[in-house]
Amino acid sequence: GGGGGELSKASSAQLTSNQPAISEENAQLPKDLPWRKRAGGFDYVVFVIRDVDIYAVTALKLQDVDAYAILDDASPPRKADQRAAATRVLSVLEHETKSIRNKQDDDTPSSSLLLQTLDPTKDLKITNVDDAEACRRHAEALAQLPSMPTDVDSKTLSQWSRLLDCERHLLHQIDQLKFGLSDANLALTPDFETKTRVLKYMGYLDEARAVTLKGRVACELSTGDELIGAEIVFGGCLEKLTPAEAAALLSALVFQEKNASAPDYDALPVNLKDSIALANTLAIRAGDIQRDFGLSVIGDEYCAENLKFGLSEVVYRWAMMDPFSEICQLTDVPEGTIVRTITRLNETCRDVKNVARIIGDASLSQKMEDAMALIRRDIVFSASLYVGS
């Protein structure tokens, strides 16, 4: 009900009225609750309950109990205080419980304060109309509950508690299964099925949806678009290239600037220009296939977004041992972007080297090893850019 929070605050004020004032910071609850503890021969649990789970506030008042010592589990000097405070609380509760049980055995009414509940308006002084009405509805709901059997002991309560935990766990599993069968969970299924058909058509999956050799190659490529990267490897774009030219071609997978100036293609070797044209063709074809299967992909845009040759000339000249100051004059891309691109290119070459091992291409593996050796030099791979003269 709506009055649960007010009821909780009022009961807290009564139970801790003898406590010294503490700061807001110290009043925060520990974040690793619940705690399972033992003190004075008692096993007990410290946990947080919701205000709506409060059954009633009883008239039993625990005097001189340091509630904050029970919640202090961080400082070793307070361990003894924690155990002592918990033992006092548990001793009082055990005494009251035994008194109630003895009265039940004698068939005489018990006068234990543990069974006397406080009236929200008279005892707890709740004056807000909405809160008082909520407390009234709460009391009416409690009156509908069956009475507790008189022969219930702690062992039975523990068994009931475990049964309730199992029920909550099963209800949670039911909710998860319902979500799994709901339309909300199936919203992305059509897109998933379409992409699966694309991968089957392009040879990345077989008819049983098992990953093929081509699919394993795509999985190895962690930088750039995996689909285009795999098409470049299997399309023969790297076969006729030297290590420097292969590095220049692969730089298009990791370079991300959209508005960079185009390279001077006339200054590039013929084989590199042919491989760039072939890579573009393969990327456009991959985009068109996705569009033909119903995905919102346009071949030209897909190619332009994932293959950017703006630094191909720069990377090629760098792999041909040109100084860094000279390659920076070939483009309007900032120096930091050049360094970052070449650094990521080294990772791409390493991925392609792993791919060559998977497909058994020793020539490609050695080519990538040589390409990494060519680009890993000078200021680009210095431990720090703050270098001395």
Image (spheres, helix red, strand yellow):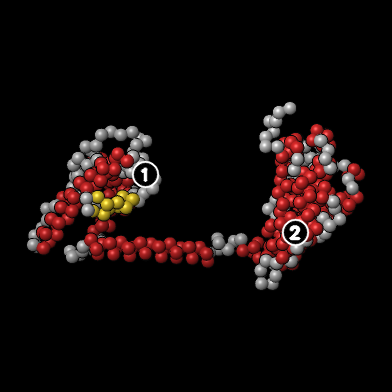
Number of residues whose C-alpha sits closer than 10 Å to that of mark 1, classed few (under 14), some (14–19) or many (20 or more): some
Mark toward the viewer: 2 or 1? 2
Residue 312 point in image, percent of width and height:
81, 45
In what element is the residue under mark 2? helix
Number of residues whose C-alpha sits closer than 10 Å to that of mark 2, classed few (under 14), some (14–19) or many (20 or more): many
Q: Can residue 80 be seen by looking at this rendering?
A: yes
Tell me what residue is drawn at x 69 percent, y 62 percent: 216
Which residue is at the front of the view, 354 or 151?
354
Disc 2 marks a residue whose amino acid type is Ala
Q: How many marks?
A: 2
Q: Residue furthest top?
A: 389
Horizontal placement of 28 versus 7: left or right? Answer: right
Q: Quadrant of residue 10?
A: top left
Residue 251 point in image, percent of width and height:
77, 47
Tell me what residue is drawn at x 77 percent, y 44 percent: 375
Q: Can residue 11 be seen by looking at this rendering?
A: no
**Residue occupied by mark 2:** 356
Which residue is at the front of the view, 351 or 123?
351
The dot on residue 30 is: 1
The earlier-in-sequence mark between 2 and 1 is 1
Which residue is at the front of the view, 303 or 341?
341
Residue 293 point in image, percent of width and height:
73, 64
Tell me what residue is drawn at x 39 percent, y 48 percent: 32
Disc 1 marks a residue whose amino acid type is Pro
Q: Quadrant of residue 166?
A: bottom left
> Vertical placement of 131 versus 360: above or below?
above
Which residue is at the front of the view, 179 or 30?
30
Horizontal placement of 332 versus 182: left or right? Answer: right
